[in-house]
Amino acid sequence: MSSRLPANARREQLLEVALTAFARAGYHETSMNEVADAAGVTKPVLYQHFESKRELYQSLLDDVGARLVGAITTATDGVESGREQTQRGFRAYFGWVADHPEAFVLLFGGASRQDVEFATAVRRFTAEAAQAIAPLIAGGIDDEHRLTLAHALVGLSEGASRRLVERGAEFDPDAVADQLSAFAWAGLRGITQPVLR
């Protein structure tokens, strides 16, 4: 059995172990017994921190989503140049994916999309990422259109990341980020206010 840890440290350890378990086998195929065994604790200890498997999974989504959004906002905070902000945002995102592929699978994988409650949590973090990106999009366009473009950039990043993670090979996150930020920046420079009909 695992040595006694302070409550906060134990909770973090359980989340880390559960992340690996859920990313490998999926939500439905992973049991609380398996998480407890992998963490080296008894099932009652696991239930002291999480009342159910659903609560554990939701807590993981919240933790992973907050870390992703935090990585982007920290990387772009205080940067003046729109182009540099775009590059740093992409580098933070793809660096996070390269360092945490299991977290990416958890956040954007099957169970997180098929369950209504989990999908709502993922949409919330996607929206937060888009909100963090939107101010980086300069130009004479209104806030709503800017936010739509930010969601498009989030989708672009997710699609590229999905392919990279599914391939399973190592990749250079900075090289991928630089290519996609150049691609995005070239497109953003040509953006004009849409004509509403």
Image (spheres, grey):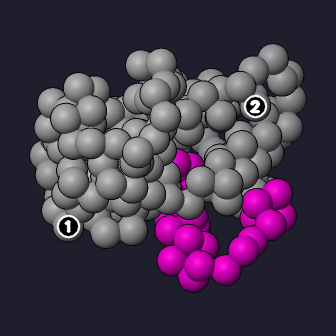
* Quadrant for the N terminus in the image: top left
Magenta residue span? 152-176
Q: Amino acid at mark 2?
A: Ala
Is 157 covered by the magenta stretch? Answer: yes
Upstream in sequence: badge 1 or badge 2:
1
Secondary structure character of the magenta stretch overall:
helix
Compared across the picture, whether 154 is left or right of 188 comes to left
Where does the image place residue 146, in percent across and percent down from the top left?
A: 53, 33
Please name the residue that numbered disc 2 is placed on: 75
Whether residue 122 is visible, yes or no, is no
Residue at the image point whose x is 80% and y is 66% from the top? 172
Compared across the picture, whether 46 is left or right of 82 comes to left
Give the number of marks. 2
Q: Amino acid at mark 1?
A: Glu
Compared across the picture, whether 172 is left or right of 66 comes to right
Where does the image place residue 101, in percent across and percent down from the top left?
A: 56, 60
